[in-house]
């Protein structure tokens, strides 16, 4: 909150400097006090701005100052406190609260409590609103991209409806989710995509287990804590009121950043002529890659107003965001409303917090995944012969069966309906009561509701549908209820022993339910999915529904102690219950301890004045992962389609063991033990500061669905804990105020992260598997051995590619591969599969820069580089193969392949594995604070922003980024929504 | 006031330490079965495992057909290579990681397992007459799965209890399992009904299964037993409920559930019982226009040309092939855009097992006689309505003839009955070779050919695009994954 207000006053300062001078001459009086203790500050200095004049506070902190004509404002300063500037208004009496510089120390949100940044003992990264990426963000988490070392925020392609994957410190699992736990304003498990980026005050990332262990069984993949904005309470009985209205708006243009180079009609004709083969030439020359894309126009408008007085503060915001995707037919509309209120009462001992937010989202989807499916628009556009016209003479979409499942992609976009409406609600109510000085008790209640409804329709006349018309409606509802109580105690004994202790309990129930109905053989193409009664053909399972629920109970406690801000100790323990686990292991312990030594405080460093800060930290903690489906620990029976009862000949619903699993009463959380050693440093009065982290992480009891022999086992699978993965890594963050004077401020922040993962084992004596083959690829004509590209195997990291090693082509055009013995073979089944790369990067670098010029101009830009990961480019594998010419279109590269004599069908090999290292200019923006001659307008800012302006990579596909998730990442299989480049023009005004 | 607050805090903390872990949308194991309807379902899973035998979920059908001399999946340029899983069957080069070998194993044991489970659950009620009949049916089904297991894999674990199944079972000798299932069948056959319900186990099913076992006794045990096989043929015939249909293709029509020729079938339905997709795999891509299909077929398998050529031109069974110029349902000539608009003419001649870019588009896309033996209804989708006959009366007659010939007798009358129905030329003096050829025509594409070739000693000989194979190819290896999970299977 404080940071935010300071930010506003900084704008104020800039305004003042540029404002046309007003003629004023008056006397102002007031009092200057310490913001925390309310003690008067004696000898504080006041100076008018714009004209000569000043005053000094008396023994009671009071002052009286004559303001000469021409003055526009005044500045208050006091040693050890941050100066404040005020614009002159009609007000003549001021209560001025100066903030001690000691208090300015950033406050980290570490889960259930806050902590000064200088007191931290764990690896906690904070990114505040002003540091986030700006511009056209499809998701607030995009703002964090490249900003925190070890937090890999990534998305393959530019689909506004697709989410980002977030991977912290190589989080890994075989079947469990690897995304972090999100905590928003203290509420665990909120979907962060429902927050307007403008409402975010800060991200705090608990990276190491010692920090994250306070969230116990759900924290193994790290915790991202998001705090939303509110205005701070003034307190102290002041009547000062600040009411701010903010309006921000932008318009942005999105364009496809790069397109794949397919043959045009003449090239296909030339090819056919040169080969003497005939094909059906329909005479057109259509660039299908151009036809399916468009320029996307997006806009966002946010209105927020906030205010506060002695006892109340609030902030309300409403935003609308509309993104038109570059792939025709895709769009996202979102409305978010949020209201945060804080009220103090009973002599400030009682604090009430209420937060409500609602999101309405409407998505229009187009099908571009699903491999060679008949309605995959991108795939259909790729194979489509450029001699096929778009439309017939009579204006109908042109269709021709060149191949099975060969459909006009524009017809699919036009004819298919695929929409979703989502409605989300988050309500949060908290009471905090100060029982004694330093002792607080609080209760927090939260309710989350995420509902969505989908509409799907394939009309009967569409060539791409093979169901005579299909309509479907489905609903998915999620509800989460949370109650949490905690007691917090802080005190300082004998001025050097600081103690902060917290204990609490939480109870959360997550419930999911849904309903889906579909039918085929549509008797009306007009009503689409709006009236499913028009569908003639219903099959068993056409109507289905589900409901499941899981419960979490926790008892948690943490104690923080420091001796004279020199030696710091933190210990926490959490006891967690999760209903997802087997009856014997529903409860688990999650302890953590960490310590820090402020070396700067010791005598050793006192002679080194240039070292302004030096702190050594070490911590160890245990966290868990329980991100698995509900009820996989027990056997249950669910409907499995229909069967004929052979005795009666009647059709009945058959019931089968759901998932074909054996019960496992010992199923438990995955356990992650992590050691973190960190060093925080600052030089030259913290002009250069930063931190280094080193961690060793061991994740054991990994859950996997092991296959068991049947007989003698009842069922084929069991979910069991047996595998183990290690991650070791280093991270560095360096921040420098490279230039810091009145004319120019330049802040630069660089982050670096390197993680090395190793699969230790895939099982134990009881449950084992030699290797897990994964990342299967598919495509027309993709022949050869089994089409997997990666395997999870001990000694290698997840994402390691094991591929036949390409050794050129034979004289008759077959691919050649290396054999076990080192020779070559054309039989891929005899080729040796070797570890030839990995989809996990070697290191990730982020570099952000912020410039502020005296004249109100500011510039920021952020680069990000991911180095050392590979992608299997299946798009190239299939479309650089000339075999389908001239019937189907291919990449330009296919002509080269044809020229060198390739005749083989596509075969998976190292030939198609590409290094996807890249450097990206994620974000660049230039803004200008327009001088305004109007007291009502506090700030007016315009900016121009570009996202994804520059990409340097050797990767030949559409996007060198990946979605990291589970054990399936590193593939580009004509399912990549093109990466987009967006230019945004925006305006922010504060009143 | 304050104290009330603390009390509230404590109350909440204490009350929220329990959570009832509950399943909402499925029936927990402890509550299943809830009612008689669900209890009756106990036998169904055992039957249900049969359905997957026919397609690539269970692979039994394809393993029989593609490893024989009558059906082939040519690699059509980029289609149907599928990692070589069809080609290795044709050329007898499968290993213990081939799809067919993997999937058939688990599918057949799924059947055994379901049967064992249902049997064990029923055993406490074995004294009740209704339970006895159900037990008899379940044991017959289990015998059927074991029959397919020893036929395909030879020595396999023989487990007859669910609750007492060993953790890591050892293999049992083929002959021991053979003896076990023959004994089971002969014990339960009297308890079975003589019914005309083709889906349920009946006396006819059990007797036919006994014929199959005794007929192949030499393969399974080293000792032939033609006499017993013939006896059980007579048992089937004397039931008097089965007879040959007038038309040779009648047992295969879409609406074949009441065919008097079929003894034991797997029910299929395009909506309710999916899984019979033979037409999808065989028809040319444009076949959907001939049959007004709602989906596009996949242009896959065909008859081996040498086999196609064994049919006389006037043999009505030859109508079960799709060859020549193809027409749309409205009678228009079909032309294939994928072959530069050439007329769609299906040619029984297949230039090679692997068709490459050196072949013409016509050869790649149109070669090989397609199988239309199972009626393809107008307007059908991806799944057929035709029930699949596992046992058929015509087969019983041919087996009767075989037993007679093998015992030095003459089987002409039984064979001639089949041939004359097919309007094939009259023949006499049938030798074993002639009988094998007749079985090939009559039982084509019904999943019998591999076993027949083995019994007649022809399975390892060379044929089109396949060289002579080693005798060990008469069984499939136990899958590697199963050995990994249970090392005793390697012993």
Image (tube, coloured by chain):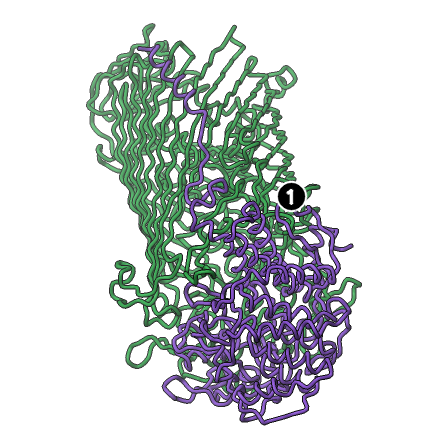
Q: Name the residue under label 1.
A: A757
Decide which of A761, A815 is in the foreground and name it. A761
Is B169 placed left or right of A630 in the picture? right
Residue A626 lies, in percent from the top left, at 53, 37
Q: Is residue A340 positioned above or below B196 on the image?
A: above
Q: Which residue lies furthest to the right in this view?
A: A821
Q: Few, some or many C-alpha atoms within 10 Å of disc 1 (few <14, some 14-19, many ≥20)?
A: many
Q: Say which quarter of the image contains residue A585.
A: top right
Tag count: 1
Q: Quadrant of residue A173?
A: top right
> Is residue A759 at all visible to an observer of this figure?
no
Position of A185 compared to B345: left or right? left
Asked whether residue A824 appears in the rendered view, the answer is yes
Please report the residue visible at 53 percent of the width from the left and 65 percent of the height from the top.
Answer: B202
Give the quarter of the figure containing the N terminus of chain A: top left
Front residue of A134/A790: it is: A790
- In the displayed structure image, the side of residue A58 where residue A120 appears, left or right: right
Residue depicted at x 51% and y 83%: B248
Placement of A765 over or under A82, stated as above or below = below
Looking at the rendered structure, the secondary structure element under dot 1 is strand
On the image, the x and y values in percent for residue A115 come to 48, 23
The answer to which of B359 and A78 lies nearer the viewer is B359
Left or right, A693 with respect to B16, comes to right
Residue B226, image x and y in percent?
Answer: 71, 74
**Chain identifier of the purple chain:** B
Chain letter matching colour green: A
Q: In which quarter of the image is the C terminus of chain A?
A: top left
Q: Horizontal and vertical percent for residue A910?
A: 66, 62
What chain letter is assigned to the residue under label 1? A
């Amino acid at each position: 909150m404080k940071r935010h207000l300071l930010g506003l006053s900084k704008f104020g300062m800039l305004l003042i400097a540029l404002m046309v001078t007003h003629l004023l001459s008056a006397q102002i009086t007031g009092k200057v006090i310490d913001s925390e203790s309310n003690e008067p500050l004696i000898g504080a200095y006041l100076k008018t701005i714009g004209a000569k004049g000043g005053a000094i506070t008396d023994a009671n902190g009071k002052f009286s100052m004559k303001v000469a004509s021409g003055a526009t404002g005044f500045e208050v300063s006091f040693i050890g406190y941050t100066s404040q500037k005020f614009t002159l208004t009609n007000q003549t009496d001021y209560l001025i609260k100066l903030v001690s510089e000691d208090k300015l120390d950033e406050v980290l949100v570490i889960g259930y409590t806050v902590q000064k940044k200088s007191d931290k003992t764990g690896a906690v990264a904070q990114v505040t609103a002003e540091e986030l990426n700006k511009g056209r963000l499809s998701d607030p988490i995009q703002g964090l991209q490249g900003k925190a070392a070890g937090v890999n925020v990534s998305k393959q392609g530019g689909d506004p409806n697709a989410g980002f994957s977030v991977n912290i410190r190589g989080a890994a699992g075989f079947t469990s989710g690897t995304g972090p736990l999100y905590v928003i304003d203290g509420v665990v498990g909120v979907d962060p995509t429902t927050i307007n980026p403008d409402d975010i005050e800060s991200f705090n990332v608990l990276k190491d287990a010692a920090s994250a262990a306070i969230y116990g069984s759900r924290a193994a993949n790290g915790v991202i804590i998001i705090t939303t904005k509110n205005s701070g309470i003034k307190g102290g009985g002041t009547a000062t009121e600040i009411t701010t209205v903010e309006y921000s708006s932008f318009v942005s243009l999105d364009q496809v950043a790069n397109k794949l180079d397919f043959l045009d009609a003449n090239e296909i004709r030339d090819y056919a002529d040169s080969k003497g083969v005939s094909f059906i030439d329909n005479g057109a020359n259509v660039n299908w890659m151009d036809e399916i894309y468009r320029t996307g126009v997006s806009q966002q408008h946010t209105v927020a107003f906030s205010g506060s007085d002695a006892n109340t503060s609030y902030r309300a915001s409403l935003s609308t965001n509309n993104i038109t995707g570059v792939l025709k037919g895709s769009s996202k509309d979102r409305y978010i409303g949020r209201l945060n209120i804080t009220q103090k009462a009973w002599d400030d001992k009682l604090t009430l917090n209420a937060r409500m937010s609602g999101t309405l989202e409407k998505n229009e989807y187009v099908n571009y995944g699903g491999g060679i499916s008949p309605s995959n628009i991108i795939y259909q556009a790729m194979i489509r012969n450029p001699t096929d016209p778009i439309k017939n003479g009579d204006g109908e979409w042109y269709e021709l069966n060149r191949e099975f499942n060969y459909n006009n992609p524009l017809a699919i976009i036009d004819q298919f309906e695929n929409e979703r409406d989502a409605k989300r609600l988050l309500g949060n109510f908290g009471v905090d009561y100060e029982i004694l000085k330093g002792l607080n008790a609080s209760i927090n209640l939260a309710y989350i509701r995420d509902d969505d409804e989908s509409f799907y329709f394939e009309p009967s006349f569409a060539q791409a549908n093979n169901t005579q018309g299909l309509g479907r409606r489905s609903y998915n509802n999620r509800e989460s209820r949370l109650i949490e109580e905690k007691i917090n105690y802080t005190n300082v004994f004998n001025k050097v022993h600081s103690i902060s202790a917290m204990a609490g309990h939480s109870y959360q129930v997550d419930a999911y339910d849904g309903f889906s109905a579909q039918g085929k053989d549509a008797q009306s193409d007009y009503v689409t999915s709006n009236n499913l009664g028009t569908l003639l053909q219903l099959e068993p399972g056409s109507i289905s529904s589900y409901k499941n629920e899981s419960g979490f109970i926790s008892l948690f406690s943490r104690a923080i102690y420091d001796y004279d801000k020199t030696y710091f100790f933190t210990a926490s323990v959490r006891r967690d219950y999760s209903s997802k686990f087997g009856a014997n292991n529903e409860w688990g312990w999650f302890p953590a301890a960490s310590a820090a030594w402020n070396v700067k405080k010791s005598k050793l460093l006192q002679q080194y004045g240039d070292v302004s800060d030096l702190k050594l930290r070490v911590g160890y903690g245990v966290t868990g992962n329980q991100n698995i489906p509900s009820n996989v620990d027990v056997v249950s029976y669910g409907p499995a389609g229909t069967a004929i009862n052979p005795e009666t000949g009647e059709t009945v619903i058959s019931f089968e063991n759901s998932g074909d699993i054996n019960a496992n009463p010992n199923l438990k959380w995955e356990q992650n033990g992590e050691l973190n050693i960190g060093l925080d440093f600052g030089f030259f009065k913290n002009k250069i500061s930063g931190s280094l982290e080193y961690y060793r992480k061991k994740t054991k009891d990994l859950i996997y669905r092991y296959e068991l022999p049947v007989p003698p086992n009842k069922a084929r699978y069991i979910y069991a804990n047996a595998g183990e993965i290690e991650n070791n890594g280093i991270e560095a963050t360096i921040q420098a105020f490279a230039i810091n004077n009145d004319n120019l401020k330049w802040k630069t922040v660089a982050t670096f992260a390197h993680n090395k993962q190793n699969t230790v084992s895939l099982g134990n004596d009881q449950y084992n598997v030699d290797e897990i083959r994964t990342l299967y690829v598919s495509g027309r004509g993709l022949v050869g051995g089994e089409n997997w590209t990666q395997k999870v195997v001990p000694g290698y990291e997840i994402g390691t590619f094991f591929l036949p090693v390409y050794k050129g082509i034979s004289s008759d055009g077959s691919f050649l591969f290396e054999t076990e013995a080192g020779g070559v073979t054309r039989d891929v089944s005899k080729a040796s599969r070797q570890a030839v790369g990995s989809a996990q990067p070697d290191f990730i670098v982020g570099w952000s820069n912020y410039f502020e010029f005296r004249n109100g101009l500011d510039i920021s830009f952020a680069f990000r580089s991911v180095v050392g990961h590979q992608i299997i480019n299946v798009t190239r594998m299939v479309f650089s193969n000339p075999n389908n010419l001239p019937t189907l279109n291919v990449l330009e590269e296919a002509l080269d392949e044809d020229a060198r004599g390739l005749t083989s069908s596509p075969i998976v090999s190292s030939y198609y594995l590409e290094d996807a290292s890249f450097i990206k200019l994620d974000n660049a923006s230039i803004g200008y604070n327009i001088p305004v001659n109007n007291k009502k307008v506090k700030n007016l800012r315009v900016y121009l922003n570009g996202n994804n302006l520059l990409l340097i990579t050797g990767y030949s596909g559409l996007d060198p980024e990946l979605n990291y998730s589970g054990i399936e990442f590193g593939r580009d299989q004509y399912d990549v929504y093109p990466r987009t480049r967006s230019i945004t023009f925006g305006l922010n005004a504060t009143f | 006031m304050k104290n009330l607050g603390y009390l509230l805090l404590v109350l909440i903390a204490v009350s929220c330490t329990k959570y009832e872990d509950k399943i909402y949308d499925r029936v927990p194991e402890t509550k299943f079965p809830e009612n008689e309807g669900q209890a009756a379902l106990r036998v169904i899973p055992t039957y249900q495992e049969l359905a997957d035998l026919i397609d690539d979920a269970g692979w039994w059908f394809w393993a029989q057909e593609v490893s024989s001399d009558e059906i082939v999946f040519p690699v059509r340029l980029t289609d149907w290579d599928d990692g070589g899983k069809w080609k290795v069957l044709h050329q007898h080069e499968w290993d213990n990681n081939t799809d067919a070998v993997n999937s058939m194993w688990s599918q057949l044991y799924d059947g055994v397992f379901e049967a064992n489970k249902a049997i064990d659950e029923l055993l406490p009620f074995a004294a009740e007459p209704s339970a006895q009949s159900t037990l008899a049916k379940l044991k017959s089904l289990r015998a059927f799965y074991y029959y397919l297991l020893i036929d395909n894999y030879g020595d396999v674990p023989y487990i007859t209890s669910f609750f007492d199944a060993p953790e890591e079972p050892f293999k049992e000798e083929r002959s021991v399992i053979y003896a076990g299932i023959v004994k089971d069948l002969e014990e339960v056959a009297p308890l079975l009904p003589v019914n005309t319900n083709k889906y349920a186990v009946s006396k006819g099913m059990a007797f036919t299964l006994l014929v199959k076992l005794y007929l192949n006794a030499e393969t399974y045990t080293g000792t032939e037993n033609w006499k017993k096989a013939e006896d059980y043929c007579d048992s089937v015939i004397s039931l008097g409920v089965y007879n040959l249909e007038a038309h040779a293709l009648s047992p295969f029509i879409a609406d074949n559930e009441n065919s008097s020729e079929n003894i034991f079938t797997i029910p299929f339905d395009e909506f309710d019982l999916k899984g019979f997709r033979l037409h999808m795999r065989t028809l040319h891509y444009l076949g959907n226009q001939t049959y007004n299909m709602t989906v596009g077929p996949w242009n896959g398998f065909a008859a081996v040309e040498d086999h196609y050529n064994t049919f006389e031109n006037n043999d009505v069974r030859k109508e079960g092939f799709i060859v020549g110029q193809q027409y749309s349902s409205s009678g228009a000539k079909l032309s294939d855009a994928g072959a530069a608009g050439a007329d769609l003419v299906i040619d029984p001649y297949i230039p090679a097992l692997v068709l490459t870019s050196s072949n013409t588009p016509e050869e790649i896309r149109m070669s090989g006689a397609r199988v239309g033996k199972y009626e393809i209804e107008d307007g059908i989708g991806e799944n057929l309505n035709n029930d699949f006959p596992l046992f058929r009366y015509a087969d019983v007659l041919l087996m009767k003839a075989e037993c007679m010939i093998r015992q030095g007798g003459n089987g002409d009358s039984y064979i001639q009955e089949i041939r004359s129905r097919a309007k094939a030329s009259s023949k006499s003096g049938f030798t074993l070779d002639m009988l094998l050829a007749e079985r090939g025509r009559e039982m084509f594409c019904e999943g019998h050919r591999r076993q027949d070739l083995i019994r007649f000693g022809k399975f390892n000989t060379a044929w089109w695009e396949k060289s002579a194979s080693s005798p060990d190819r008469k069984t499939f290896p136990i899958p590697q994954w199963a050995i990994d999970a249970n090392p005793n299977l390697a012993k």
